[in-house]
Image: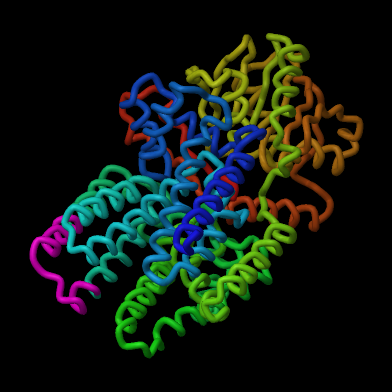
Amino acid sequence: MCRPVAMEIGAIAITLAGLAARIWMASGTFLNPDEALHFRLANQPTLALAYRESLTASHPPLLTVVLYYWRALGTSELWLRMPLVLAGTVFCWVFYKWLAKATNELAGFIGLLFVAFLPPIVRLSAEVRQYALLLVFLASALYFLDDAFENNSAARMAAFCFCLYLAMLSHYSAFWFAIALAIYALFRIFTEGIRGSLLESWVAGQLGAVALAVILYKTHLSKLGLGDSRPVLQGWMSDVFLQRSYFDRTRDHALVFLIGHSFGVFQYFFGQLAVGDVMGLLFIGGLGLLLWRKNAPDCLRARSLALLIVLPFAIACAASLAHVYPYGGTRHMAFLIIPAMAGVSVAIARISSEKWTRGITIAALVLLVCVLFGKERRPRMDRADQGQSHMTAAMGFIAKGVTPPDVIFTDYQSDLVLGHYLCQQRAISLAAAPSGFEQFSCAGHRVVSRNYKRWWFQVDSFAEDWRQLTEVYALKPGTSVWIFQAEWDANLADQLQKDFPEFHNLQIERFGNNINMFRLTVGQALPDLSSRESSSSQFKASSSRLAACEFSFSLQHRPRCTELEQGVALTARRFPSGPPR
């Protein structure tokens, strides 16, 4: 068998293995709160209402539209995740084809190994999130752009523009990559003397991208963060979460911030701190090898690739320094997977002197260390605790152990999960509720939750939550209220039991470590939960909240955001609030 055919078969096998890894990661677990939120936005009677719901989220509408149609074929966890699983798999193949063509087959093969099997990258395309769509459309745009220049093809340039638009409709971070692609294209246009219909097609496509960006900004992006101390272009997210991912001149030194957070990006992608640092150094080395290549025929092409690899990082750094977008080891940096893996793959290929056995061995060892010793960042659910059997058991307990007169009380993120499963994936119709609360009924059970402003229950504020619940709903003494949590850190019951003698005998129904519920009775005396003794426990709780915010991506709903949905039902007021990483 000739070598090119063998390499192609090997690449196909790796891509299919990457698909299997994603299917495994996506199967057997219940939806986390963010995934349940994305489905709830799309699970509407009409596409128009689903689009209006999407305006309350901090992302463009494409995923909502995809889920709106996809749900007609099924609503199981694996099926809802399948569009992202498939998109993530196609991304692996397109990335390989682009990198192999832009550099060499070995670098492309190494890059394919990384994007197919690195656990954090697999996880990004095994959940109901936007990142798999973002990556496949960005990689496709890049592939068609290079192909258009090499073949002088206006049709391929049109394909580039179409993929770029879809990426921009998937996630707002695509804007930064679009700027990088524009600068890269201009460099090639001027250095290669591109003229005629190809240049005209590119200019027309760029004007279309600008128009789309303006439309998205006017209709959606500019409305995010209304009521915050900073508008969206001043880093509204830094007031809500991701504080440490924005440069703060009163706290950070610019150079130290950029270097540290750049290595944090590689630590996140590889899922292992030491490996991430080494790969960050290799990335820098790869850039050097491209810039200082002395082979004249390849010199311009190598420098074009170096420019493409470094531009997204430079733009992301500038955006963070300008307080516009976070920068660091979070999934918000998913668009940097393409240049990061390209730079590292080029470096490993050159270090191995283009020897296939040596290069693949190095890449395989890196992957092995990441898989065996990598650690998912908090907040997280261990796979065993997120098993579907736990959710089935929890719903079974509610069906048998919670009587209709009882009230189920949740925080907002638990409400998203509970509503999804208690209502059996049907669209949820919210009933009129007092200020600060939301409520719905499913399967004969009445569920009351705090609204988006109370993303999770906290021990020091739970007494106030309880007081408001009993007062505004005028609950009679003796009424049973079940406190339900299903989230990354479902620890309210444990903290109550540990910190307060009155709760030492609290009976907690546990379904794994991330689902629990316990019963309180209206009229029973509660201790002063705001006066916990130890400052260390307060620091721990504060740190946990900060960690949960630091790696989240959803936006807290602000009161004025509802102006976007004039005349829409109460369901349109659901806004992704303070989510987990």
Residue sitting nearer the eye, 388 or 319: 388
State the image coordinates of residue 489 (x, y, percent, origin top left): 70, 43
475 left or right, relative to 305? right
Q: In this rendering, is residue 390 above or below 260?
A: above
State the image coordinates of residue 195 (x, y, percent, origin top left): 11, 69
Q: In this rendering, is residue 206 above or below 89?
A: below
Residue sitting nearer the eye, 129 or 346: 346
51 left or right, relative to 348? left
Residue 430 shows up from this direction: no
160 left or right, relative to 464? left
Farthest residue in the left direction?
Answer: 196
Residue sitting nearer the eye, 424 or 556: 424
State the image coordinates of residue 168 (x, y, percent, origin top left): 33, 50
Residue at 68 percent of width and 17 percent of height: 407
**Residue 199 magenta:** yes
Question: Mainly helix, strand or loop, the magenta region?
Answer: helix
Q: In this rendering, is residue 188 above or below 392?
A: below
Q: In this rendering, is residue 268 above or below 296?
A: above
Farthest residue in the front direction?
Answer: 1
Residue sitting nearer the eye, 480 or 64: 64
- Please provide the residue range marked out in magenta: 188-206
